[in-house]
Image: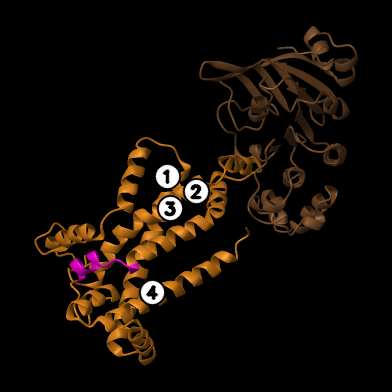
Chain colours: A orange, B brown
C-alpha cells in the first residue's frame, strides 16, 4: 500500500497532471497569501506585546493564547456565517469582500488561524531577549525605534519559528478550508480537502500520495527557511 | 576647572517607599575622572543611571552643561553626549566588530571601519573582530562593552564597575585604556567601583556614597591621606561603615 502510494506520489509529481498541479498550486497560493497577511499583522503585534507594558495587556495575551489553540473548523464556521449572503459581511455586497466558496474566503479563515500563532511565538521570542539590552543600546545613542529594531533582530530566530509555525498550521488544516471553500473541483480544492475526498471515495493510494506531496512540500519549505536562518550569527 | 558638566542639587531618587539616593550637592567637572566608591547597595549605580539620563530624579534639580535635565529624557543630541558602560554588558548576537560599530551606525556614521578597528586595537581585541560576541569570555565581553562606548567619543563616559570579576591582566588593560582615553580626548569620566584601590589608581577626585548620601567628595590624595569624615577613614581602612 505504502509502496504503491510512494510510486503514485512520484508519478504525480513527475507527470504534473493538470488537476493535481492545480490543487498543489492553490494550496500554496492560499496558505502563502494568508501567511503573508498573518506575518504583517502578527509580528508587529507580538513585538508590541513583548516590549510594552500597558493596561489590559494580560487580556490581549490571554486572547492570543486562546486563538493559538482555536479549532480551525470553528474558525471556518465563523467565517462561513460572516460571509454567507445573509451574514453581516456577505449581505453588504461589497466588491472587496470575497464571497463564500472562493479562495479569498479560505485566505480569510487561514489568516484568523495563523495570526495568533505568529503573534504568540513572536511575543515569546521578543520577551526572551535580555531586557537590559534595550537600555544599553539606548545608552549607546540609539533612538527608541533603533533599539526596538535591534531587539527584534536579536529575536529573529524565534520570529522565523513563529512564521514557520503559522505556515504549518494553515497548510495542514482542513476544517476551515472545507467549510468556507467547499472543496469545489477546479476552484477551491486544496491538498487537504482532496485527501479527505479521495479517502471517502476509497482511493486510498491516491489520498496517501497526495499526503506525501503535502509532506514533501512542507519539508522543502522548512529546509529553505532553515537555510535562511542559518546565515544568522549564533 | 570650568563650568561643571553636571550640577546636582537636592537630588533624590525614591523606589516605592525607599529613598535610595539623596544627594545634597554634587558637581562633576569637565575632563576629570570622578571615582564613586561605597558599599554595595549605597546607590552608586542609581547615581550613574541618573547621570546617564536612564532615570529621572524623584525630586531636586539636575543640570547638564548648564541645562536643566530633570524633566524627563533630554533631547537625542544631549543624550548622545553621554554613554554608559554597564556592570553586566549585554552584547548583540553579532560579530565583535558589529557590536563596536553599533553606536556609530545609529548615528549614521558611514566610514566607521577605521575608528572601530583603532578602538579594538587599543583594547587588544582586533584579532577577535570577526568572532561572534556569544563566544567571548567575560573579560573579552567587558572589553567589547568599553570599546563600543569609547568609539563614539562621548563627552561623558559613565563606568559601572568596569572591571568587576575580572582577572588582573584584564583589569590592567581596561584601566590603561580609560586613562589614555581621558588624556587623548579630555572626556569626563564618572567611575563607580567598590574597589577603593581602583579609585585611587584612576580618579582625580573620589566620592564616598553611603546609604544614598554623599559622605565626602575630595581630591584623591586628600580622600585617602587625610579624609575629613570618619566614615571615609573607616571605609578606606577596610572597616565596615554600614
First in sequence, mark 3 or 1: give its number.
1
B124 vs A8, left or right, is: right
Residue at the spot 81% in from the left edge and 57% down from the top edge: B127
- Residue A138 is one of the magenta-drawn residues: no
| Disc 3 chain ID | A
Residue at the spot 76% in from the left edge and 22% down from the top edge: B37
Instruction: Establish if B69 lies above or below B119.
Output: above
Secondary structure type for disc 2: helix
Decide: few, some or many residues near mark 2? Use Cα within 10 Å; few <14, some 14-19, many ≥20: many
Does the image show residue B67?
no
Q: Which residue is mark 3?
A: A121
First in sequence, mark 1 or 4: give its number.
1
Residue at the spot 65% in from the left edge and 56% down from the top edge: B94
Tell me which corner region of the image, top left, top right, bottom left or bottom right, holds residue B172.
top right
Q: Residue furthest left?
A: A86
Q: Which residue is mark 2?
A: A126
Q: Quadrant of the C terminus of chain A?
A: bottom right
Residue A221 locus on image (x, y percent) = 45, 72
Q: Which residue is mark 1?
A: A49
Q: Which residues are magenta?
A: A171-181
Residue at the spot 89% in from the left edge and 11% down from the top edge: B226
Amino acid at each position: 500500500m505504502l509502496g504503491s502510494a510512494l510510486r503514485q506520489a512520484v508519478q504525480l509529481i513527475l507527470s504534473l497532471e493538470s488537476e493535481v498541479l492545480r490543487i498543489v498550486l492553490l494550496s500554496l497560493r492560499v496558505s502563502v497569501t494568508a501567511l503573508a497577511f498573518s506575518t504583517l499583522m502578527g509580528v508587529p503585534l507580538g513585538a508590541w506585546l513583548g516590549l510594552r507594558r500597558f493596561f489590559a495587556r494580560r487580556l490581549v495575551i490571554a486572547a492570543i493564547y486562546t486563538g493559538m489553540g482555536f479549532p480551525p473548523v470553528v474558525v471556518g464556521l465563523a467565517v462561513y456565517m460572516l460571509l454567507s449572503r445573509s451574514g453581516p459581511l456577505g449581505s453588504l455586497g461589497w466588491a472587496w469582500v470575497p464571497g463564500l466558496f472562493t479562495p479569498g474566503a479560505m485566505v480569510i479563515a487561514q489568516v484568523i488561524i495563523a495570526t495568533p500563532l505568529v503573534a504568540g511565538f513572536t511575543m515569546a521570542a521578543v520577551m526572551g531577549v535580555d531586557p537590559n539590552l534595550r537600555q544599553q543600546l539606548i545608552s549607546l545613542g540609539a533612538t527608541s525605534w533603533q533599539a526596538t529594531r535591534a531587539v527584534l533582530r536579536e529575536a529573529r530566530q524565534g520570529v522565523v519559528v513563529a512564521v514557520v509555525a503559522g505556515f504549518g498550521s494553515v497548510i495542514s488544516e482542513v476544517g476551515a478550508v472545507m467549510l468556507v471553500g467547499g472543496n469545489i473541483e477546479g476552484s477551491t480544492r486544496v491538498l487537504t480537502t482532496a485527501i479527505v475526498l479521495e479517502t471517502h471515495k476509497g482511493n486510498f493510494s491516491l489520498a496517501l500520495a497526495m499526503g506525501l506531496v503535502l509532506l514533501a512540500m512542507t519539508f522543502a519549505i522548512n529546509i529553505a527557511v532553515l537555510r535562511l536562518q542559518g546565515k544568522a550569527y549564533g | 576647572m570650568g563650568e561643571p558638566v553636571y550640577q546636582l542639587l537636592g537630588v533624590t531618587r525614591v523606589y516605592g517607599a525607599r529613598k535610595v539616593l539623596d544627594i545634597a550637592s554634587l558637581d562633576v567637572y569637565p575632563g576629570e575622572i570622578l571615582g564613586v566608591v561605597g558599599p554595595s547597595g549605597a546607590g552608586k549605580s542609581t547615581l550613574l543611571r541618573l547621570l546617564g539620563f536612564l532615570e529621572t530624579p524623584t525630586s531636586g534639580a539636575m543640570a547638564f552643561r548648564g541645562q536643566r535635565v530633570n524633566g524627563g529624557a533630554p533631547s537625542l543630541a544631549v543624550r548622545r553626549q553621554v554613554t554608559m558602560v554597564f556592570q553586566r554588558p549585554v552584547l548583540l548576537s553579532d560579530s565583535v566588530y558589529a557590536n563596536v560599530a553599533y553606536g556609530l551606525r545609529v548615528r549614521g556614521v558611514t566610514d566607521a571601519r577605521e575608528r572601530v578597528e583603532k578602538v579594538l586595537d587599543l583594547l587588544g581585541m582586533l584579532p577577535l573582530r570577526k568572532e561572534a560576541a556569544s563566544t567571548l569570555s567575560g573579560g573579552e565581553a567587558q572589553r567589547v562593552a568599553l570599546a563600543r562606548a569609547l568609539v563614539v567619543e562621548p563627552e561623558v563616559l559613565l563606568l559601572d564597575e568596569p572591571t568587576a570579576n575580572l582577572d588582573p591582566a584584564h583589569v590592567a588593560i581596561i584601566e590603561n585604556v580609560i586613562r589614555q582615553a581621558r588624556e587623548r580626548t579630555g572626556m569626563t569620566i564618572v567611575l563607580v567601583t567598590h574597589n577603593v584601590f581602583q579609585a585611587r589608581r584612576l580618579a582625580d577626585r573620589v566620592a564616598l556614597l553611603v546609604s544614598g548620601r554623599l559622605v565626602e567628595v575630595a581630591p584623591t590624595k586628600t580622600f585617602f591621606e587625610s579624609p575629613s569624615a570618619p566614615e571615609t577613614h573607616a571605609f578606606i581602612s577596610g572597616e565596615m561603615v554600614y
